[in-house]
Image (cartoon, rainbow, N blue to C red):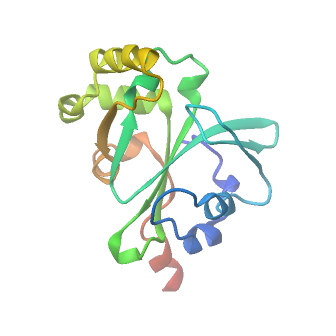
């Protein structure tokens, strides 16, 4: 499955990117893309950057975390057909990696939301149409409100690996060093 072309990424830069800590990291994140693509940061509520590869523009939302990621689910209620094609790009790091990226995985927003809503465990966390609708209603009344629901990304990659495009596997460095 290809959500975004693998050639859009610079694997050497991914291996060097340090993303731990709060906020920022735009410079390190921008560097993970190859020189063959153009990136433009946006102020869109659903995605962070436009990545242009050839004649195609990808809207990409970055999620950087060790495992547990929090989502403002009100934003996902009644998204447009175009928005379901947004690329959710998970940049994962672990304690032992000292903030270095060890996994990069991609999935379309629409597929991700459907996957969460179909999983009984994730439904218990609030990944339901009802919760998204309530969150969206509250967000209209209180625009700065964030209504967060969790998802353990590493666990989801283990359970639903075929649903994700793994751009940078966690064993990439070990394979290169041997």
Query: Residue at position x 38%, y 13% from top?
Result: 137
Residue 160 sits in quarter: top left
Q: Quadrant of residue 120?
A: top left
Question: On the rendered structure, is 170 left or right of 26?
Answer: left
Looking at the picture, does residue 154 appear above or below residue 12? above
Look at 57% across and 28% down and name the residue there.
85
Q: Residue at point 46% right, 59% down?
A: 22
Quadrant in the picture for residue 72: top left
Viewer-side residue, 27 vs 173: 27
Residue 117 in the image: above or below residue 91: above
Q: How many marks?
A: 0
Looking at the image, which residue sits at the far bottom?
Answer: 178
Q: In the image, residue 76 lies at what x, y percent?
A: 44, 24
- Residue 68 position, x and y percent, is 31, 51
Residue 5 on image: x %, y %: 65, 47
Name the residue nearer the viewer: 54 or 41. 41
Answer with left or right where residue 132 lies relative to residue 79.
left
Estimate the x, y position of residue 127 in percent, counting from the top left.
Answer: 29, 28
The structure residue drawn at horizontal position 69% and vertical position 39%, both measured from the top left corner, is 42
Q: Is residue 153 above or below residue 127?
A: below
77 to the left or right of 84: left
């Amino acid at each position: 499955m290809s959500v975004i072309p693998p050639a859009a990424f610079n694997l050497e830069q991914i291996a060097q990117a340090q993303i731990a800590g709060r906020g920022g990291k735009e410079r390190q994140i921008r560097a993970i893309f190859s020189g063959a693509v153009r990136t433009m940061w946006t102020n869109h509520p659903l995605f962070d950057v436009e990545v242009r590869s050839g004649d195609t523009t990808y809207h990409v939302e970055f999620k950087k975390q060790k495992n547990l990621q929090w989502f403002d689910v009100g934003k996902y209620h009644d998204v447009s057909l175009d928005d379901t094609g947004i690329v959710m790009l998970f940049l994962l790091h672990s304690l032992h990696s000292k903030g270095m990226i060890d996994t990069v995985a991609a999935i379309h927003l629409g597929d991700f939301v459907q996957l969460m809503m179909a999983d009984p465990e994730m439904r218990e966390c609030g990944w339901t149409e009802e919760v998204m609708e309530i969150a969206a209603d509250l967000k209209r009344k209180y625009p700065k409100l964030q209504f967060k629901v969790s998802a353990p990304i590493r666990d989801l990659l283990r359970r639903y690996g075929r649903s994700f495009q793994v751009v940078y596997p966690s064993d990439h460095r070990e394979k290169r060093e041997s």
